Amino acid sequence: MADLAINGGRPVRRTLLPYGHQSIDEDDIRAVVDVLRSDWITTGPKVAEFEEAIAHYVGARHAVSFSSGTSALHGAVYAAGLTSGDEAITTPLTFCATANCVIYQDGTPVLADVSADTLNIDPEEIASRLTPRTKAILPVDYAGHPADLGPILKLADQRGLVVIEDASHALGAEYEGQRVGAVSHMTVFSFHPVKHVTTGEGGIVTTDRAEFASRLRLFRNHGINSDARLRQAEGQWFYEMVALGYNYRLTDIGSALGLAQLAKLEMNLARRREIAGRYEVAFSSLAGVIPPRPRVAVKSAWHLYPIRLDLPSLRFSRAEVFAALRAENIGVNVHYIPVHLHPFYRERFGYKCGEYPHAEAAYESLISLPMFHAMTVQDAEDVISAVEKVVAYCRR
Ligand SMILES: *Cc1c(COP(=O)(O)O)cnc(C)c1O
């Protein structure tokens, strides 16, 4: 049996393969340079063009861009009308920004456990956490697999709640034949470099409701209302600040990069699906490893490829398997440390271990394998060889 690199053997790869990485090519660079040579570098024509392109791609009426996915989440929580003392229900198995944005508006994030198969928020758990103060539900499309949106929207409609979908992982995913971005009341995407499309830093909210779109535009620009009729009546210099907002604007530089990236999205999604297909074939018959199994009603965008270890059948802990894979030069990661286990959340809300058993059990056994569209077939084969090598060594 091949010696593990962690025990001094030869690693499967000579160089580290990261878990995710951006791809920037010459036409991306040209698009950015063109903007740098133009009259507008911050909020100009490219921002509007990018917003229209995203709205068109997902099939929503409006898209409002932001300086990051996090500020877009903050804007969506504001647009939903959430204020002091209100509650919003979200998943513990996410990046902390999904829950933080509720606290930014002085609300309380309430966590509801995930379903054991998809690791997305469980609609029945949401139902059990509703109170008269609940204002919004924030499902996350974990790893690119759309959340259980049908039941969640039904629940929201019965109770008059707003569904803000955190689709940071899911640009290009589909739920029952519809693109993510056109399903929930508001959908948030991130354009961080590890996501499907990047603007450097950036984010966007898509929605069909004009009222949400105008509140989002107000919020990202200091709460300033630049109503054309008022300018006509009072003078061209006139504007009014009507709410407390922020400078959360995306730039033309970022938007030009986003437009060039968006043109390659379908090709990149196909590449991710191909890699996921290879992983599925290799891992579905490998004892000790449980690969993700998308539900039939969805098409995942495969932002991540999180496998779970069948720990009772292995002699190694997750930490040991993780270290062994890193030694083989496979840049594995873990998504996510559950939100309620972070010191800030424990201290502020009194959370304890054991409150969200599905999320916590998943966390104990999760490992994200490399998944990005610039990976080659050989890269994917290296990942498979390394997982097979490590798991074979530590199987009971
Ligand atoms: C990336 C990400 C965010 C935040 O996006 P930024 O653009 O980095 O602010 C929020 N939620 C999830 C689930 C993410 O993966």
Image: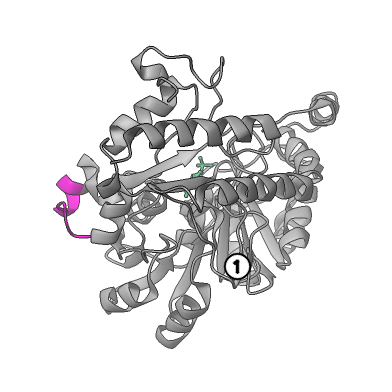
Q: Nearer the viewer, residue 48 or 155?
A: 155
Residue 223 in sight here: no
Residue at disc 1, CB closer than 8 Å to ligand 1: no
Q: Is residue 350 magenta?
A: yes
Residue at image position (51%, 55%) is 75
Residue 81 in sight here: yes
Q: How many marks?
A: 1
Which residues fall within the magenta stretch? 346-356
- The picture places residue 387, in percent across and down from the top left corner, at 47, 35
- The picture places residue 186, in percent across and down from the top left corner, at 56, 65
Q: Nearer the viewer, residue 339 or 336?
A: 336
- The picture places residue 220, in percent across and down from the top left corner, at 56, 49
- The picture places residue 92, in percent across and down from the top left corner, at 32, 55
Give the labeled residue for mark 1.
298
Residue at image position (47%, 59%) is 140
Residue at image position (43%, 87%) is 158
10 Å neighbourhood of mark 1: few (<14), some, or many (≥20)? some
Q: Is residue 273 magenta?
A: no
Please name the predominant secondary structure of the magenta segment in the image: loop
The furthest residue to the top: 8
Say above or below: 194 vs 280: above
State left or right for residue 352 relative to residue 113.
left
